[in-house]
Image (tube, coloured by chain):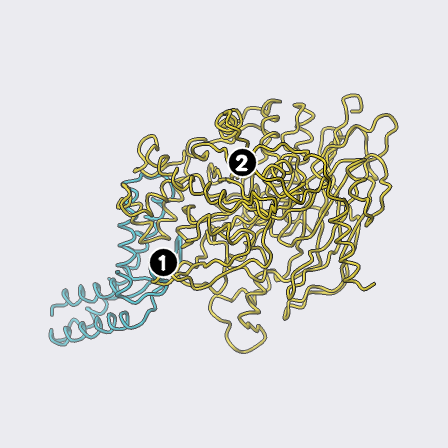
Amino acid sequence: MSPRAFRWTLWLGAVLALPFPFAGVQPAFIPVGRQSMLAALTAAFVWTEGTAGVGPMVLALFLGQAVLWGGVCWVVAYGFSRALGAARPGFRQRVALVLVAILLGVGIVDRFYVTPYSQFSERSSLLEVYR
Amino acid sequence: MSGWTRFVVALCAFVTASAAGAEPPTFVRTEERAPCAHRDPLRRPFFGDLHVHTTYSFDAWGQGTRNDPFDAYRFAKGEPVGIQPYDAAGQPARHIQLRRPLDFAMVSDHAEKLGETELCRTPGSPAYDRLACVIARRWPRLGYALINSLFMAVPPASLSFCGEDGEVCRKAAQGPWRRIQEAAEQHYDRTAACRFTTFVGSEWTGMPDGENIHRNLVFRNAAVPENPPNYVEDRTAERLWERLDRDCIDAGTGCDVLAIPHNSNVSGGRMFAVEQSDGRPITRAWAAQRARLETLVEVTQHKGDSECRAGNAGDELCSFETLPYATMTEMAAQVPDTTPRPGSYVREALARGLLLGQETGVNPFAFGLIGSTDGHLGAPGFVAEDQFVGHAAGTVSARLAIPPMPDRLDFNPGGLAVLWAEENSRDALFEAMRRREAYATSGPRMLVRMFGSLETPAAVCGSDAFVAEGYAHGVPMGGELPAPGPGGGAPVLSVWALRDAGVPGHPATPLERIQIVKSWVEDGETHTRVFDVAGEDAPGEVDLATCAPAPGGADSLCAAWQDPDFRPGAPSVYYARVVERPSCRWNQFVCNAAGVDCDAKTPIPDGLGACCDPDVPRTIRERAWTSPIWFTPTEAER
């Protein structure tokens, strides 16, 4: 696995599974992927219903924090890839798979995501986050 | 005679101070119904809630409320109802029930979004699959924030699927509006037993710039407009009043209506501004229209108390459930703002009204006082501090799980409306509202009567003749004293209060004192003074561990108080405030039930950190506020 692929794999795993605090209408603890999804929904709402009300502000909150935490994920992934830059591709691949598997595994098993925007539950597992 | 016996005797004297008369009613009957078997010409107190939301309100639905107006009236009559969260099979996680049924209630769902909510929740409706509806159902908290705020915008916006003229949603609103009427009809007791009265009603939810100018609309009988007036179509109070006159009072259908403003505390000063909505000066016609349509104000409810601002100079008891926000937007965002905004509180409005009355010839702020809940669970009158489960519209939600602290700490369970009427029927209660013979309580069911007269009453406190003499020689709460004439004395206010009798296992709190709040105009300026007229403060505190109220207090308090500062030429207004001994606030009951011990080494349970926060009040002084009595001097006396 090339350092570039390693970096992207780690980043993708983190944005999909690593929870980050969301400060806004209702405090949440969700992955960047979920924040992006809510940002997309809000953008679609603003597109169809206009800019009156808090829509643009909510969109900015979702988008801004998604970009912020996505950037943090990128920096961390970049740091890992630099640290393992001299390692053999096979080793990088194993590290990437293990890290992503831990992230996804813990996320799927434990309901530690705080999801007040959900229709179903205030605490969710990773699978429920994207339901 | 034991204390309890004395209390029961006093209660009997208080309520049955008159014999049921055989005379015809003094109110006009506008509907077909059996006359009530128990009619009292000297009037009885009826307890109710005129501000209740059900699943038809968008914000309640978004919070997972499933109770509809039929459920709400069942609850008001004493039956248990389920509340959120609901499981996958639709079973509620908990049930709630009043310890004492109400005498009357009104479902007042938001007129705005009534049609939108109906369309979004009804599979197969033309808007069911529209994005806004999908977001509202699948991501309810997001939908709540986005859609609710459209109506708070300037100008308020509707959802695009309503069409350019809003006709789609207006038509859709007729479904829930019809069911609201059906529920009111089904639960209205038209028999001679007169056990329970309903009113058809709605809430006009005006919110320019996030400043609250909401009004609840109470319709006198079953004759109501085709659609409830709403803020999207009528964007000022003046437009609303025009609509009420045109579509109801002057429509020739037998329709009659009152509008009851609420939450002036977060109106940014708009509710009792001394100019019209467009900035023009108040005219006599404007003042007369407002005074005619808005005879009552909801002074207390779950979003705080609107009597007087916290820290009001010389009146420490103003610090009762006051919110540190000036507008609804600040309240929602929890951004404190204690900048005084004149026009936000009832006490200053009553005083301003005297001035405006001098200027225009009509006092536009000659209103009486009631309390209600504004609960969004479809649960009228659910006001007991130890039963509070949150109000179900805001940031703390029980939609998905029961929160450890059921609501924001600055909110409360709300209050009740009490009407002195001859019988428990729509016409009798409506006329009590119109003549302002009403009072507000913060929840307890204390009994309060007040009469004003220009002569010292012969009947002493506690006598059977108190009420009959009060009516014969003066005016009740909500009334206007006549001019005293040459050499006339100062007004005498006779106030008699009995503590809430409580229910077995849940005794109520004794009374601490009665106060008279007087405002008057002198040299073109308003003044206010608070007088203690009966009872007194006593040592002792609430037992926070058991929530036993502070010791001391009285079962009954009474005073005949003559204004020592009366100036015959000064317009004046008087209302009574009846205060209980301190008792536990709802959050202390929650903390006790959870077994939180702030001195123990064990960690405080999640979500209950406030239990050990010294800045969070743990006790309150429940109270009642009577409608005022006015004294307006003649031109010659000024």
Quadrant in the picture for the N terminus of chain B: bottom right
Q: Subunit of mark 1?
A: A
Task: Using the image, determine if residue B421 lies above or below residue B504.
Answer: above
Residue under the image location 30 percent in, 67 percent down: A125
Q: Position of residue B358 (x, y in %)?
A: 70, 25
Task: Determine the image quadrant of residue A112.
Answer: bottom left
Position of the C terminus of chain B by quadrant: top right
Residue B9 visible (yes or no) = yes
Residue farthest toward the bottom in the current orientation of the protein: B601
In this structure image, what is the colour of chain A?
A: cyan
Residue B33 position in % (x across, y down): 57, 38
Q: Nearer the viewer, mark 1 or mark 2?
A: 2
Residue shown at the point (44%, 39%) measured from the top left: B111
Residue at mark 1: A22
What is the letter of the yellow chain?
Answer: B
**Residue drawn at 65 percent across, 42 percent down:** B423
Q: Nearer the viewer, residue B107 or B74?
A: B74
Query: Separation of disc 1 and disc 2 at Cα?
Result: 49 Å
The residue pinned by badge 2 equals B221
Task: Give left or right: position of B617 versus B4.
Answer: left
Q: Nearer the viewer, residue B131 or B379?
A: B379
Q: Residues within 10 Å of mark 1 (few under 14, many from 20)?
A: many
Q: Is B386 rendered above or below residue A25?
A: below
* SS under mark 2: loop
The tally of labels here is 2
Q: Secondary structure at mark 1?
A: strand
